Amino acid sequence: MTSVAEFTIDYRRILDPQGNLVAPLPKFAEDLDQVIAMYAAMTRVRVFDTKAINLQRTGQLGTYPSSLGHEATHIGVGAAMRPEDVLAPVYREFGTQLWRGVTMAEILAYWGGDERGNDFAVPRHDFAWCVPIATQTLHAAGAAMAFKMRGEPRCALAYIGDGGTSEGAFYEALNVAGARTLPVVFVIVNNGWAISVPVAAQTASRTLAQKAIAAGIPGVQIDGNDVFVVRQVVGEALERARRGGGSCVIETLTYRLSDHTTADDASRYRPQSEVEQARAFEPLVRLREYLLRVGAWGDAQERSLLQDCAFEVESAVAAYLAGDAQSTDAMFDTLFAALPAHLREQRDAARRYAVKRNGH
Amino acid sequence: MVEAIALAQAWELQHDDAVVVLGQDVGANGGVFRATAGLQSRFGAARVQDTPLAEATIAGLSVGMATHGLKPVAEIQFMGFMYPALDQIVNHMSRMRNRTRGRLTCPVVIRTPHGGGIHAPEHHSESMETLLCHIPGLRVVCPSSPARAYGLLLAAIRDPDPVMFLEPVRLYRAMRQEVTDDGRALPLDRCFILREGTAVTLVTWGAMTLETLRAAAELEVHGISAEVIDLATLSPIDSGAILDSVAKTGRLVIVHEAARNVGLGAEIAAIVAEHALYDLQAPIQRVTGFDTIMPLFKLERDYIPNTQRIIDAVRVTLQ
C-alpha cells in the first residue's frame, strides 16, 4: 500500500490572548499608527454594534445580527484587502465593510428595512449582504473569473460561517476556484455556532480549513481574535491570488459572544459558562494590552477614541432616523432596467393604496 | 433551429467582448445538442468555457461575472437539471438590480432545452416555464422557429436584465429555415401573430406552435378561421396583443405542453377574463399537458397535446 495524498493544516497566531507576541511581528505592525488604526476600527464597530442592538430593542431597527467578538477577523480582513478588491459578505461582517467605506447609515438603512442601504456609495463594486447561506461564495468566484479573464490584478474575498461550510454551494465554489485557479479567497469565520448548532454537530471534519484540500487548494486555520495574524495571513493569500497563485481557504477561530441575531435567545441552547470563558479570548483586550505594553496607548487615548466613536455613531443614527421613507414606487423602479407595462399598472395601484408614512 | 442559436451566440461573441458562453460540455463538444458548436475553436476556451458539472456553480458564477462587467450566456443542459440553479436565479439573479437599487445588475442569459418529444431519458423532457414566470425580475422567452430563436436570443443577450431562454427540443432539428445572420434582434415582450384569423384565437408558444398551426390549417379546411399567436416572451406577457385578437375573434383557446394546474394558460385566461370578458362569446378552453409526471418516452406523445385535441377544443368554443 502506498499513500497517494497527504495533508496537514497549520494553525497560526501572532498575538496571544494576553497581548504577547508569539510569532515575529508582521511588517505592517511595525508602524504603530496602523496598529492604532485597526484598534480604533475594532472599537468603532463594537460601539456601533451596541447601539444597533439598542435601536432594535427600542423598535427603531429590524432584526440585526451582532458582530460582537468578531472584530479582529473583520478588521484584519478589511485591512488586508485593497479597495479595488471585491468583498462578498454574509451579513455580519460590518467591521470589514466599514473599513472599506460602507457607512453606518447604510448599514442601519438596510437592517431598518430599506434597500437603499445596499446601494453603497463606496465601494460600488462590493456585493451586498447575502442572507441565503453560502450562495455568495459562488458570486465571489464569478467576480474572480471576470478579473482573471480581463487580466486585472484584483481579487474577490468571500466570507462564510462555520454552518455555511455544510452547504453545497460552498463546496461548489471551492471546487471551481481550484479547478480554474481563480483569484478568490474564502474566509470561514468559525464562531462556534450556527444559530443553535455547534460545529461538532455540523461536521466530523477536524478543521473547517481542511475542506479546502478536496478542492485542491490550501487551507489554514488561524486565531480569528488576533488581528495581526488575520491581516497577515489574509494579506498573504490575496497577494498570492493576485499573482496568479489561485485560491485558498482561511478558517478564523473566533466566538460569537452575542445571540445569533436580535431575534435569537442563545441561552436556550448555549451554556453561559462557555460564553464567559470565551470572553477571556476576545479580540479587543489583547490588542489594547499590546498597545499599552509598547507604550502607544493610554487612558486618555482610550477615552478620546470612545468619545469619537460615540459621536460618529450618534450622528449616523440621527441621519438614519431623519431619513426620508421610500415611496411604493421603489418596489418597482429598479426591478428591471425599463419597467414592463403590467408593472406600470401595478405601480399605479400600489400608489393608490400606499400606507401613509413619514420616515421611521 | 440549433444552428440559429449557435449563430446568435457567435454574433454576440464577435461583437461584444463582454459576452462569455459557459456551461457543461459547451466547449470542445459544442453542447450536447450542438447549440454551441464551433464557438470554442473560434473564440477560445476563456470566452467559451466548460464549467464543472454543477448547475448552482453555473448560475452563481454567472451572477458574479455579470455583476462585474461580463455578459454570461449560460447553458443548463436540460431543464430537469435546473433546480439546483434556482437558488441562485431566484435569490440573486432576479433581484440583484432591485435589492441594490440599480448599483449591481445581472445581464445573464440562461439557455435551456424545453419540453419533450425526442425520446429522451427521464428528467430530460420537462416544461417548467411556470416556475420561472412566477419569479419577479426575470424575463422568460421561448422561440418557435429558427429565425425567432436567432432574433430573440440576440435580444436576450443584449437585454440588461436576466433572461431565461427556453429552447424547445422538438424544434432543434425539426424545422429548417434560412436565417439571415445580420445581427438583427427581434423585440422581447411581444407576441408574434403566426396566422391571422377571425373566428378563434389560439395562443401558444414553443414547440406547440407546430400542432397549433396544423390544427389551424385543418380548421380552415372546415371553414373555421383561426388566429395563431406565438406568445414568445412568456413573462412578461404581451396582454395587449392577446386582448386585441380576442376582441376580434371572441373566442380563446390556450395551448401549452406544460401541466395545466397553475400553468401559464391560467394566467392568460385570467387576463382575458379581467379585461375582455364581454368580448368572449364562449368559455375559454385550455389544451395542456396533464397534471401528471411527464411520462417516459413510450407515452410522451400521449402527454403532449396533439392536433386533434386542439381542434376539439376549438369546436367546443364554437358550439
Image (cartoon, rainbow, N blue to C red):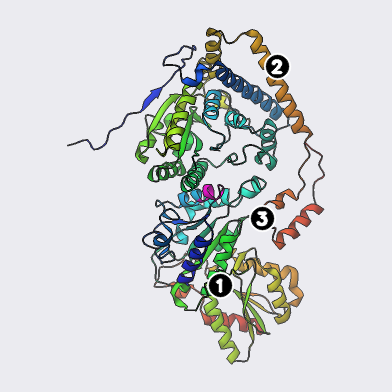
Q: Name the residue under label 2.
A: A307
Residue B303, numbered label: none
Residue A72, horizontal then vertical, whole percent:
53, 23
> What secondary structure do most residues of the magenta stretch adopt?
helix
Q: At label 2, which amino acid type do we have? A: Gln
Residue B221, horizontal then vertical, whole percent:
58, 92
Q: What stretch is highlighted in magenta?
A: B62-69
Q: Do the residues labelled 3 and 2 touch (CB within 8 Å)?
A: no
Q: Measuring 68% from the left and 76% from the top, which residue is drawn there?
A: B283
Is residue A346 visible to us here?
yes
Q: Considering depth in this image, is B106 or B293 the residue closer to the camera? A: B106
Residue B216 position by quadrant: bottom right
Q: Name the residue under label 3.
A: A337
Q: Considering depth in this image, is A274 or B54 the residue closer to the camera? A: B54
Q: Measuring 57% from the left and 59% from the top, which residue is drawn there?
A: B163
Q: Would you call the spot at circle 1 few (<14 residues within 10 Å), some (14-19), or many (20 or more)?
A: many
Q: At label 1, which amino acid type do we have? A: Arg
Q: Do labels 3 and 1 share a chain?
A: no
Q: Considering depth in this image, is A230 or B42 the residue closer to the camera? A: B42
Measured in 3D between alpha carbons, the distance from the residue under mark 3 to the one under mark 2, in whole angstroms, is 44 Å
